[in-house]
C-alpha cells in the first residue's frame, strides 16, 4: 500500500482522534504505509525521522503480537503521531524544538523497550 503525503497525514490525524484504541492488523498496514511516506518526507530531519522510526517499531511489535499490546504502547503511538503531524504542519522548521520533542519521545520509548525486555526475560514490568 502506497499513500501520498496528504493521505499519510490524514491517516495519522484519523488515528489520533479515533476512540478505538485497539491496533488490529487491518490498522497496522496503512499506518506503516503512512510512516514510510513520512520518513521519505522527513529524511533530512534527523529527529523527526527518529520519532517515526520509534513509532514504526511499536507497530512492528504490535504486528508481532497480533495487535494485542498494552495501552501505554497505544498512548505512545498516538503521541508520536501527533508530534509528527505538528512537525509537518509547522510552517517554520525549528531544530531546537524537534530535538526537545525527540528527547521526550525517546525517554518514553526507552521505558517501553524496558517493559518489552522485562517481558521477554519473564520479569514483572
Image (tube, grey):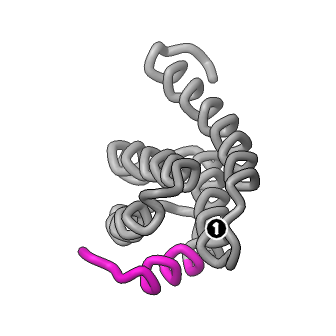
Q: Residue at x 74, y 51 (%)?
A: 96
Q: Is residue 19 above or below residue 45?
A: below
The reply to whether residue 107 is visible in this rendering is: yes
Query: What residue lies at 49% left-to-right and 53% top-to-bottom?
Result: 49
User: In the structure shown, which secondary structural element does the residue marked by tag 1 occupy?
Assistant: helix
Q: Quadrant of the N terminus?
A: bottom left
Q: Position of residue 106 (x, y in %)?
A: 63, 38
Q: Residue at x 58, y 44 (%)?
A: 70
Q: Quadrant location of residue 15? A: bottom right
Residue that carries the numbered disc 1 in the rendered image = 87
Number of numbered discs overlaid on the protein picture: 1
**Quick one: 41 or 67, which is closer to the camera?**
41
Q: Main secondary structure of the magenta part?
A: helix
Q: Nearer the viewer, residue 33 or 38?
A: 38
Q: Residue 65: x percent and y percent?
A: 38, 44
Camera-nearest residue between 13 and 53: 53
Q: Nearer the viewer, residue 102 or 96?
A: 96
Q: Is residue 9 magenta?
A: yes
Image quadrant where residue 2 sits: bottom left
For the record, the magenta segment spans 1-14
Q: Is residue 46 left or right of residue 125?
A: left
Residue 114 lies, with reference to residue 31, above or below; the image says above
Q: Is residue 79 left or right of residue 61?
A: right
Q: Quadrant of residue 13?
A: bottom right
Amino acid at each position: 500500500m502506497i499513500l501520498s503525503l496528504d493521505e499519510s497525514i490524514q491517516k495519522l490525524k484519523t488515528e489520533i482522534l479515533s476512540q478505538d484504541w485497539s491496533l488490529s492488523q487491518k490498522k497496522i498496514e496503512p499506518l506503516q504505509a503512512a510512516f514510510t511516506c513520512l520518513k521519505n518526507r522527513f529524511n533530512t530531519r534527523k529527529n523527526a525521522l527518529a520519532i517515526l522510526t520509534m513509532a514504526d517499531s511499536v507497530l512492528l511489535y504490535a504486528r508481532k503480537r497480533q495487535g494485542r499490546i498494552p495501552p501505554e504502547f497505544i498512548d505512545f503511538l498516538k503521541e508520536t503521531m501527533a508530534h509528527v503531524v505538528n512537525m509537518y504542519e509547522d510552517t517554520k522548521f525549528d531544530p531546537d524544538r524537534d530535538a526537545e520533542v525527540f528527547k521526550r519521545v525517546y525517554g518514553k520509548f526507552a521505558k517501553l523497550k524496558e517493559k518489552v525486555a522485562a517481558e521477554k526475560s519473564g520479569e514483572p514490568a
